[in-house]
Amino acid sequence: MRTVAGAPPPVAEPVSTPPLRTSEAESDATPSALANGPVPPPSSPTVAGDSDASAFVSVAETAVVQLHDGITLTQWLRQRGEREGWRKTPEEPVTPTSTPGPECLSYWRTATLPSGAEITEAAYFYPPPTPSPAVFPTLSAQELINGCFLTIVRLEAAVVTSDFAPAQERDAHAQEFGNALDQAVRQRFTKLYGESIGRKDDAVWGRGSILLRDAARWIHGAEIVSGYDPRGSPFGQLVSGPAVFVRAQLQLSGQAKHDHSEADGDRSVPKSQFHRAVALAKADAALSRRFEDLYEQVFRAGSSEEEAKQPENAKWRESLLPLLREWLAALKTAPPAQRAAGLLAADRFVEATQKVVGGVPGWPEKPEKTSELQKLGAVFEMNGIAGYYFYAGNWEEEARKLDPDGPAGKMAVIGWMDRGSCDMAGWGSDLLNKVINDGEGLLAKGLDAPTAAQVHFMIGDAYSDIFSIAKGYDPNGDYPNIQERDADPAHAKAVEHYRAGLAIDNSSKDAKHAWSQAWHLSARLLPTMRYACFSD
């Protein structure tokens, strides 16, 4: 299966939040159990007693109360990191095992509780918020890294078990140990932050990338989650196996959430292109108005189940095929440029139905039967793994050929670049090179300033992907043609295009994403990937 490397799961928009309350925590917190180094493990496993619970709660409290807005890496290292035995992970900002994304770097340390249970603490640092206006970053790599903010802290304590005990006995001991530490944390945090807002049916991000239910949760300047995970997860855990965990996270800044995922059916590029293409087609005014109304109904119907049930939004399916048939018929005698615009509008319409509502009447179901949309000229391809048909974008390609240097043809190229999907034929190095070549070809033809900025940003994203792959992020070896020698040239070209785009546009969402990409490149970190595709 092909997947797109993307950003982390979406989080809420950032808000200005007050620091966590520290007065009570500072007055009666015990010294950190990690301050004096590991405690030798006992010869046999023991159930967590008061000393274990007290030590774990102390470390958890100390970790959480430090988390408030504005603590830079430099400040944190001076206050804690340089005297408490923290280690940087990885040792260098860019390594073959680094994962592209918004994070700057992380630190960790480990020790043992009195019972011998392993305890690991981690601190994660993220770039500063995008400035307004989004001016290209000019500081050195180390200066940028030093300005990263402490955003997430995590703590996990593993369960001590005996390899010689029966499985049932080990499980019972793990459950008892985990519950004891978990309850101690909940009691202390309830005293500090009030009653937990977590419910048994809530699913929250626990130790790593696995959703966990029945966890305690507080919102108090940061989101604080604690609980006992009896399963363990192979993804993102700090210690092996069942563990008690605490995670606290400030809300991520905007650039950490910017996602170009094709799953977003309400992106601005296809919508704006649809309406402009309808205008350029110069069809009958009443027909154009009906076509645009139907397009907007698709988005209203896809916004929620409640909207989909509204009478005006439930009948649009009945109108779709007749209206699309009428629209395409009107284009048959139109001049090439107008026909290209009309076909592009039809393409954006079918694309919207596919992404927003997951297909419509006339969508193909069986290979041996031609569907109504296929009869109208739409080409579909089968995703053999997922077992569904997807629209192949042939009307977009036809528009591009009919009006290669005109507005419809340029919009078709920009729309293709914006979509950049792993479902497309030729994914891999060919897709990255095609985005670059098509984008540079558009710039050579001349574009209005806002569109030129957008194209610069997309070319920059393609070069950024090449940089990340060249620096070692190719988990399955899908890009054998991209080597270490390609890293510096790709880095230089990405920076060049981001700089050019930000000189034109320094305020849009795309500009904020470009600033984040440029920031990561300037800091010699792997930026978020947009066009790269990886096999499972």
Image (cartoon, rainbow, N blue to C red):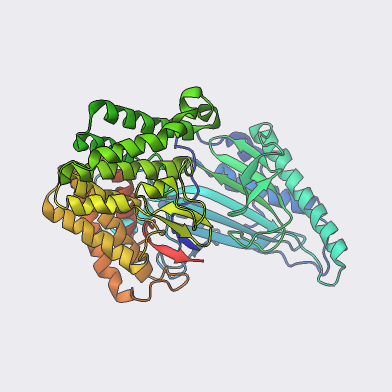
Q: Residue at x 62, y 36 (%)?
A: 218
Q: Is residue 257 above or below residue 121?
A: above
Where is 344 relative to 209, above or below? above
Q: Toward the viewer: 117 or 62?
A: 117
Where on the picture, by quarter, is residue 134? top left
Drawn side of residue 242 relative to residue 471, left or right: right
What is the quadrant of residue 484 in the picture? Answer: bottom left
Q: Residue at x 49, y 58 (%)?
A: 367
Q: For the point 38% across and 35% down, which residue is it?
A: 322
Q: Which of 37 and 411 is in front in this view?
A: 411
Question: Which quadrant of the view contains residue 226?
Answer: top right
Number of marks:
0
Residue 495 visible in the picture = yes
Residue shown at the point (52%, 32%) measured from the top left: 304
Rendering coords of residue 91 (x, y %)? 45, 68
Q: Position of residue 107 (x, y in %)?
A: 51, 59
Q: What is the residue that sits farthest to the top in this orientation?
A: 311
Residue 469 pos. (x, y %): 37, 68
Depth check: give the residue in front, 263 or 52: 263
Q: What percent of the width, then of the height, locates residue 473? A: 42, 68
377 in relation to 44, above or below:
above
Question: Can residue 139 be seen here?
Answer: no
In the image, 98 versus 85, the foreground residue is: 98
